[in-house]
Image: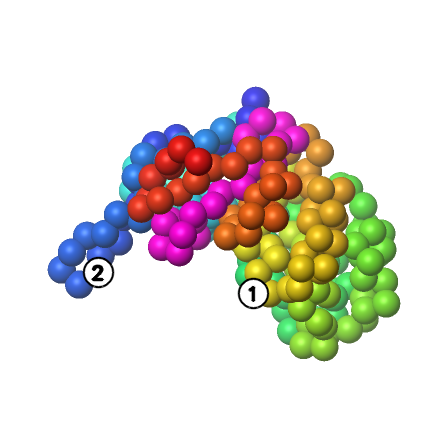
Amino acid sequence: MSPLSAAGLHRFYRRGGSEVAALLDVGLACAPGETVAVTGPSGSGKSTLLALLAGLDNPDGGNVQVCGEQLSHRSARDGARLRARHIGVLTQSSGLLEHLSVLQNVRLAASLRRRAGGGGGPGADELLDRLGMSAVRRSRPASLSGGETARAGLAVALAGNPDVLLADEPTAEISSAEERDVLDLLQQCRPTHGATVLITHSDVVASRADRVLHLRDGRLVPG
């Protein structure tokens, strides 16, 4: 069974009096343990695809399944429960709550996954140790460097051992040296039997994936 699959995804938006296609008949199926990179120019539909795969938005056609359960077109409550149970999302904004320490952010994410019926994996302290964040675990997000923020966001996404990891430009705001470190950590900590999908402009990030998909004008195209 694929931990994450999508079939026939279409998404349209209204712009003034016109309808604009963001995705047209996009499908993918991740093998257990596979990392897939999705590349393409700005405006190609990458962020739209990530939102659909995470269940943060619904397609106008097609559907997304996570661990054998349909994620698309569910009630907001059921969609949030499935996302919390199965999916960790790393966004460009890190997803960190500014009033909590790094450790508190990770513990909160792990507790939400447990309440949704998921959970397991390393505890918050162990996860931060593995990500080299021990020295700043009590720090607030505003005091972190770019690389530390990326690592803290990764820790939050991985808290509670999700089956699927979705990352939107995971190395966009960090140096090339920090990029290598974060990618090494992604490879070490990604879901072993689940799926990892990386949305990226970076050739370096794409080179670390098992498979690369290319989006252009809302369609998958040959590389």
Left or right of 188 in this view: 73: left
Residue 120, label in figure: none
Q: Secondary structure at mark 2?
A: strand
Q: Nearer the viewer, residue 186 or 221?
A: 221
Is residue 19 shown in magenta?
no
**Mark 2 and mark 1: Cα distance apart in space:** 26 Å
User: Which image quadrant: the C terminus?
Assistant: top left
Say if 184 sits above or below 3 in the image. Answer: below
Q: State the residue position of label 1.
A: 93
The region drawn magenta spans: 30-48
**Residue 70, percent from left and from top:** 46, 33
Q: Residues within 10 Å of mark 2 (few under 14, many from 20)?
A: few
Q: Please name the amino acid that badge 2 sits on.
A: Arg
The answer to whether residue 78 is seen in the rendering is no
Residue plotted at (65% across, 52% down)? 157
Q: How is the image coloured?
A: rainbow
Say if 184 sits above or below 97 in the image. Answer: above
Q: Secondary structure at mark 1?
A: loop
**Residue 99, percent from left and from top:** 67, 75
Q: Please name the amino acid that badge 1 sits on.
A: Ser
**Which residue is outermost to the top?**
1
Q: State the residue position of label 2.
A: 15
Task: Determine whether label 2 and label 1 are within 8 Å by CB.
Answer: no
Is residue 47 shown in magenta?
yes
Residue plotted at (72% across, 59% down)? 177
